Structures are given as structure tokens and as C-alpha cells.
């Protein structure tokens, strides 16, 4: 039996909207890429899925972008771990968390610091292709 790892890919993510409430923010992505790696397999597989990323107890640095927009890249921080342009799933982090994203074409960067971060996958992922390792 092999282990499977799913990884959220940040570059190319399509940020559809941002919903800000009382000390909480939700980023709605209409499409992100998910890389599925299987131990011992000769190829990985690439999937796409809609997700929403919620950060609680927030402080925002920079200006939030106009939506929809495409994300060029960024960092997701889970306490002492910084994931550049990707992050392992599931994301249900507590402690010192941060989401720093750069918008494609504008190079506008914004950061959201918080005390918890959750990623909710919406519907089922759709297969795109296999990728040689």
C-alpha cells in the first residue's frame, strides 16, 4: 500500500472573491491546482478544484486586490513552517499563521496574519493530467 500526498499549488490560483467579516477573512478560489503524489509511482497527477481559505483573528497588511484575479505566487505560514508557492493538505492550522500572496500582472502583494487557517475543498476535484516525476 502506498502513501498519497496532496499539495495545493499557489501559482495560477484564480481568486474569485474576498469576503471579510468580524475579525475573519475568506478567500474564495474558483480554481486551484492540486498535485497528488503517490509513493512508488512513476508519475504524479494534477487536479483542479474550487476551494475557500479562511483566516481568523486577522491583521491585514497591504491592499486587498480587486477580484477576480490570478495569483502569481506566495507563502503560507504554519507557525515555524513556511511553504513557498505550495502547501500540504489538509490545511487546518492553529497558532501563528500567515497568507502572503502576489497578484499576477500587478505584482501587488498582501498579507493576512491570523491565529487559525482552514482550507475547505468545494465539490470534487477534476483530473487534468499525469506528470512525470
Image (cartoon, rainbow, N blue to C red):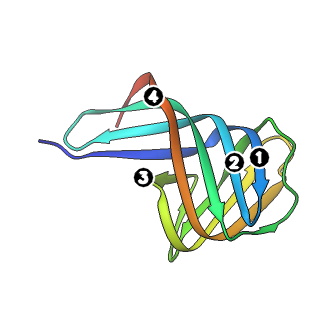
> Mark 4 highlights which residue?
124
* Separation (CA) of disc 1 from disc 4: 22 Å
Dot 2, how many residues are within 10 Å of its Cα: few (below 14), some (14-19), or many (20+)? some
Q: Disc 2 vs disc 1: Cβ atoms closer than 8 Å?
A: yes
Q: Disc 1 vs disc 4: Cβ atoms closer than 8 Å?
A: no
Quick one: SS at disc 1? strand
- For the point 34% across and 37% down, which residue is it? 133
Quick one: SS at disc 2? strand
* Separation (CA) of disc 3 from disc 4: 15 Å
What is the number of the mark on residue 27? Answer: 2
Dot 1, how many residues are within 10 Å of its Cα: few (below 14), some (14-19), or many (20+)? some
> Mark 1 highlights which residue?
18
> Mark 3 highlights which residue?
90
* Separation (CA) of disc 4 from disc 2: 18 Å
Front residue (pair 128, 26): 26
Residue 107 x %, y %: 83, 50
Vertical side of 124 occupied by 113: above or below: below
* Separation (CA) of disc 2 from disc 1: 5 Å
Vertical side of 55 occupied by 133: above or below: above
Residue 76 x %, y %: 58, 61
Vertical side of 33 occupied by 103: above or below: below
* Separation (CA) of disc 1 from disc 3: 21 Å
Q: Residue furthest front?
A: 22
User: Which comes before the other along the chain, label 2 or label 3?
Assistant: 2
* Separation (CA) of disc 2 from disc 3: 16 Å
Residue 126 x %, y %: 46, 23
Amino acid at each position: 500500500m502506498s502513501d498519497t500526498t496532496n499539495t495545493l499549488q499557489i501559482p495560477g490560483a484564480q481568486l474569485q472573491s474576498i469576503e471579510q467579516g468580524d475579525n475573519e477573512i475568506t478567500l474564495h478560489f474558483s480554481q486551484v491546482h492540486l498535485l497528488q503524489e503517490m509513493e512508488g509511482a512513476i508519475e504524479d497527477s494534477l487536479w483542479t478544484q474550487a476551494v475557500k481559505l479562511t483566516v481568523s483573528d486577522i491583521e491585514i497588511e497591504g491592499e486587498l486586490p480587486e477580484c477576480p484575479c490570478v495569483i502569481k505566487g506566495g507563502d503560507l505560514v504554519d507557525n515555524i513552517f513556511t511553504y513557498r508557492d505550495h502547501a500540504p493538505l489538509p490545511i487546518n492550522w492553529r497558532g501563528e499563521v500567515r497568507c502572503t500572496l502576489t497578484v499576477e500582472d500587478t505584482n501587488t502583494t498582501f498579507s493576512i496574519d491570523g491565529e487559525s487557517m482552514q482550507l475547505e475543498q468545494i465539490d470534487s476535484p477534476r483530473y487534468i493530467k499525469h506528470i512525470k516525476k
